[in-house]
Image: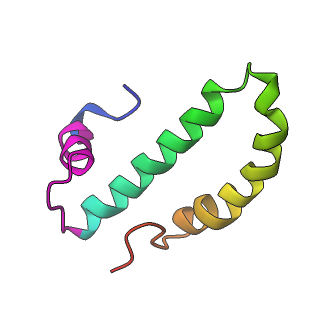
Amino acid sequence: MMIPSEHRDLFLRGYYGDNITGQNELVLLEGFMLVAIIGYYVFQMENESVHAWMRERMPKLCADYCIPYLSGERIFYIV
């Protein structure tokens, strides 16, 4: 539901392992992966038992993945 309707087919192809080779498609898939990871954190916000875990890992997620992705770097599919 979080993925724009015009990109859902691409997401499903990537999810099921179809060969995706276009650079723009791979960049979008990386963005979808980040959305999924962030969605997990959001889903866990009411679960106080994982707050310490999230506080420890969120800065690393941002530094290692979010900031480079937003700067135009490839983060998962390095070709």
The answer to whether residue 24 is left or right of residue 49 is left
- Residue that sits furthest to the bottom in the current view: 79
Which span of residues is magenta-colored? 7-22
Residue 14 is covered by the magenta coloring: yes
Q: Quadrant of the C terminus?
A: bottom left
- The residue depicted at 81 percent of the width and 50 percent of the height is 56
Say which quadrant the N terminus sits in.
Answer: top left
Does 44 sit above or below residue 36? above
Q: Among all residues in the image, which is located at the extreme front?
A: 49
Instruction: Please give the name of the residue rendered at 26% of the width and 69% of the height, measured from the top-left corner.
Output: 23
Give the residue drawn at x 34%, y 55%: 28
Q: Residue 33 placed where, x, y %? A: 44, 49
Give the camera-side residue of 50 and 60.
Answer: 50
| 44 lies above or below 13 | above
Residue 48 coordinates in the image, percent (x, y): 81, 23
Determine the image quadrant of residue 24: bottom left
User: How far across and how far down the image is residue 21, in percent?
Assistant: 18, 68
Q: Toward the viewer: 28 or 19?
A: 19
Q: Residue furthest left?
A: 19
Residue extending farthest top: 46
User: Along the horizontal axis of the image, is 55 left or right of 73?
Assistant: right
With 23 as the anchor, is 67 left or right in this view? Answer: right
Tag count: 0
Q: How is the image coloured?
A: rainbow
Q: Residue 43: give x, y in percent of width and height.
A: 61, 25
The image quarter in which residue 9 lies: top left
Q: Can residue 37 be found in the magenta stretch?
A: no
Residue at horizontal 24%, vertical 37%?
8
Between 49 and 6, the residue placed more toward the observer is 49
Q: Quadrant of residue 5 in the image?
A: top left
Task: Left or right? Give the position of 38 relative to 35.
Answer: right
Q: In the figure, 46 relative to 6: above or below?
A: above
